[in-house]
Image (cartoon, rainbow, N blue to C red):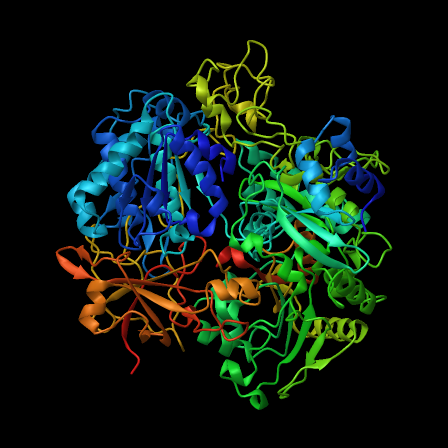
Amino acid sequence: MTNHWNDIQHTDCALIIGANPAENHPISMKFVQKAKERGATVISADPRYTRTSTQAHIYAPFRSGTDIPLIGGLIHYAIENDLIHKEYVVNYTNASFLVNEDYQFNDGIFSGYDENSRSYDQSTWTFQTDEDGNILKDETLQHPRSVYQLMKEHYSRYDVDTVCSVTGTPKEDFLKMAEAFCATGQVGKSGTIMYAMGTTQHTVGSQNVRAYGLIQLLLGNIGVPGGGVNAMRGECNVQGSTDMALLFHILPGYLPAPTGTERHKDLASYNKNETPHGGWWNNRPKYLVSLLKAWYGDAATKENDFLYDYLPKNSRNSSHISLFEAMYDGDIKGMLVWGQNPIVGGPNTTKEQKAMENLDWLVAIDLWETETAAFWKQKAGSNPESINTEVFMLPACGPYEKEGAVTNSSRWKQFRWKALEPKGEAKADAWICHNLAKRVKKLYQGDNSTKGNIINALNWSFGDGDYPSNDLINREINGYDLTTGKTVLNFTQLQDDGTTSCGNWIYSGVYPDAGPDEEKNRAKDRDNKDTGMENYLNWSFAWPLNRRILYNRASADLNGQPWSDDKKVIWWDGETWANSYDVPDFAAVKAPGTPAEPGAPALAGHSGDDPFIMNAHGHGGLFAPMNDGPFPEHYEPYESPVPNAFSSVDLNPAVVIWTGDYNEKGDRSQFPIVVTTYRLTEHWQSGSMTRNLEWLSELQGHMFVELSEELAEEKGIKNKDKVVISSARGEIEAYAMVTKRFKPYTIRGEKVHHIGMPWHWGYMGITTGAIANTLTPHIGDANTMIPEYKAFLGDVRRAD
Amino acid sequence: MFDLSRRQFLKLSGATAATVAVVELGFNPNEAKAQANEYKIARASTTPTICPYCSVGCGILVHVNEEKNDVLYTEGDPDHPINKGSLCSKGTSIRQLYTSDRRVEKPLYRAPGSSEWVEKDWDWTLNKIAEKIKKTRDESFVERENGITVNRTEAIASLGGAALENEECYLIAKFMRGLGATFIEHQARI
């Protein structure tokens, strides 16, 4: 989230899209209700009329997979009706920048495309510069090569009639939504976009989010209270686990994971290629070297490049789908699974379960025997005799049987204290990891081969206890001044010369300026006094630097004054920004209007009016390169009921297409129905933490598929019938739930049915049911490889 | 179980925990709430936690009978600025995470081709896993490829972490990268 949960109450209009917070983040709706009480308009845009829709003033149905037409339509509406926040757009975004003359867009393809590699050469997606490298601008926004004019032209194709024919949204509903949301472009108003996996789980998922970013920048809604692009995350610590880099492509704190390429062949190459001259990321080498010092301790020296060579360099995209494809191909021999259940939660689960049979060993760490731990059993449809995988099931602690902190969607790192001793012989994952690491290190003692040296150099100093010291882990994450032994105040003190260490720079500041005997873990802060605009600066610690609203410079005008009194978060009082309701998102001593130092690196190259400190140019990126283009463009889902109305290119041209066993693609002639998946309040993700509890199993006891009355009539299906849902990957059984919440769509003049089902069920637990992900394909987003769970083709019929 | 400063504070406030820093700030919980809680949880210890389900991050109080090491009751934390005491159906159910008789309580092992689990002790289990990790790593480790130092193993994968704590995620990220693993993924991707 750019903003935070409590801040939603300050919005004038909440556009809730690709998400159903009333169902999946129920307590967050308190803040939506508070906003409503203040007079805000609530919009629910969703293929299905959800629990959230019941709380909305405007419901805009749209076919799953058509977010970009819907939001592109809003962009078009805002521009054509002159509803943008002009002063904000001119000064805080890159709308005025002139784009490279060679940049082009024709019939669904941006300049630089290579069909063979399905990828773009992005060298024309750049800005025009003068001889000194300064970006050329036209602040009147009239220049035909300005970002604004190119964007206007790009979205001129997204007129209301074309949009509604593709999304299936009734035109009057679209116009109500456009009028209400674009009204937040008025100076002093704010609108928020709340989204979740309904947005990201598409082959265009990243560009869906980018489209939200574009409309929010145009309306001046980023950085302001009640504004923002707010991802409502699904697990209690999925924010923290992402920050800590349990993903192949990053190191802690969003440093790109090094690859086995020339780009990253040594520390100098990595720094040269990953360090922009302008913006905050100019500090990246300090964060990488400090990380290497945290990981390799005294062994990491300037002379040996701080042991950069010891970091593993991957050979390929190693994301979830690739991981299971590699396992299916026999490349992966052993796997440790920490509280995850891919046999229910992964896409194309039949293939993923088959892949696991190729493992020599599997370690499943969980509170329960999950479907993943039990994949070899007969009840999984397997023949145990033919599966040679050794499986270790390790009993893990529940959340209050151990101590440690979790980071919520607001980026608040909140501590959980231990309430009682663990159940049975259960142990915390921290204990398991710690004791495994110690054992593996012991096995390599005296081994002077390279691989022995690497594991022996790994600095593992978390105390002598049976459990690793939580306090020492947090100090290491925060970072030390190695010359004094005290923890650093925050990441602004980190250096690239080996005098500081830091396990994750974005959390630096959570344990500030502490000597060995001082306890200062700010995740434990519990002062719930409202410090202004419900930012609660003394409750827990928000990364970065305890900042509650990101890019908050944009909440004030060029004079440093809030756009309106009821949207006050930071302000210039004549001398400083520091006496504000939030931690300023830039140098607090830099007055409004302070000019940038021409050619200077990092933030010195930014003026006192540049809010987007992570970007080299300090401006919000209306035009910004992604793998699949600098502007979001609509492509149909991998499996779609219609051809693309916006170009002759149906599928996102930059996605990876997997072939081989179990990767059949469904065709609309055989599978005419759009299928999506979703969640329920009473269950959580793959169900292991809820289908094993009595109350929740009783509240939601059965796997079902939800379909419209019209489709039920066509298929002769009655409510509660057992039905078969099929896709090109397989078939499952479920109970029919015939509702008014789905309606047939009219898409480009044709009737298209849409169904949906929860994905919580599997064969273990108190309540069991079919695995929805049997039906979903192995295809992912062009940037993140997040699977396209939310829009695929299927069919439904009575079971008998 | 808890540190002393926190324990003392709990006794004083009867409601929630705080660090020394908070006490210094003069944090004074609502007394009416405190009294109500004290009555309900007389002779129990109370520990604040954060809900393990979605990412709203609601506060929950866990009331424990320390003598029996058992959870008496859980409820929304009235002092928490997000949920202010309210909870959804999942958050309301977290007592059963402990009281459930479905929990796995000992390490289990399934041999190749076997159709059943066998209970094992932790030492045997961790030693065996450590040996597996070393063997797989040794057999698959690549130091250089195409003239570039890569120092990796693509034969060991790590999956999961979104339900764990930051400290745990940090340890896993460090240990796995330390082994040379590159197939490191978790729920955020899916």
Above/below status of A440 relative to A275: below
Name the side, left or right, on which A516 lies relative to A190: right
Above/below status of A300 relative to A370: above
The part of the image, by quadrant, that contains residue A508 is: top right
Name the side, left or right, on which A464 lies relative to A615: right
**Residue placed furthest toward the left:** A749
**Residue placed furthest toward the front:** B39
Residue A700, given in percent of the width and then of the height, sits at: 46, 64
Residue toward you, A259 or A365: A365
The part of the image, by quadrant, that contains residue A511 is: top right
Residue A646, given in percent of the width and then of the height, sits at: 21, 50
Residue toward you, A182 or A315: A182
Above/below status of A594 relative to A324: above
**Residue placed furthest toward the bottom:** A385
Name the side, left or right, on which A477 lies relative to A20: right
Above/below status of B161 relative to B116: above
Q: Count up the numbered dots.
A: 0
Residue B120, given in percent of the width and then of the height, sits at: 76, 78
Quarter that holds the C terminus of chain A: bottom left
Residue in view at x 54 percent, y 47 percent: B87
Residue A444, given in percent of the width and then of the height, sits at: 80, 67
Residue A601 visible in rendering: no
Residue in view at x 79 percent, y 46 percent: A472
Residue B145 visible in rendering: yes
